[in-house]
Amino acid sequence: MTSGCAEETERFDDDDRAEKAAEVVSVGDVVELDDAMGTALAEYDGRIVEWKLEGTSRGPRYQFDIRADGDSEDVEVSVDAVSGEFLGCDD
């Protein structure tokens, strides 16, 4: 029996390789997690409920989901993982 869904594929080319290589994070090159957390919490007061370190086309960054006391929504705060500088917030 075959399913009614067709699988769509695409070749992995040099542009794809370059894009993925730019997303690789070398842990030895990033600021300490505690320092990045301090930067994030200095910009947005609350409690960190989730975090991740990810590679982006602009370099590695920490992303923290912070929830202020009494709020039900998180705010995403980004910190440059190499320089430790605050990058911005997203609701």
Image (tube, helix red, strand yellow):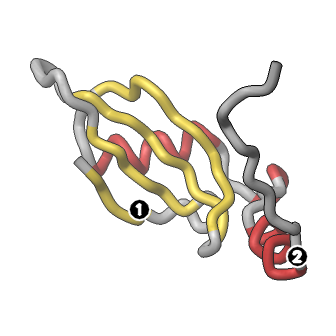
* Quarter of the figure with residue 76: top left
Q: Position of residue 44 (x, y in %)?
A: 25, 44
**Relative horizontal placement of residue 24, taking residue 79 as reference (left or right):** right
Residue that badge 2 annotates? 13
Total numbered circles? 2
Q: Amino acid at mark 2?
A: Asp
Q: At x 63% / y 64%, what residue is drawn? A: 56
Q: Outermost residue, left direction? A: 70
Closer-to-camera residue (79/15): 15
Position of the N terminus, as image quadrant, is top right
Residue that badge 1 annotates? 86
**Relative horizontal placement of residue 85, taking residue 22 as reference (left or right):** left
Q: Secondary structure at mark 2?
A: loop
Q: Position of residue 71 (x, y in %)?
A: 13, 24
Residue 70 seen from this side: yes
Q: Secondary structure at mark 1?
A: strand
Q: At x 54% / y 62%, what residue is drawn? A: 80
40 is higher (above) or lower (below) than 5: below
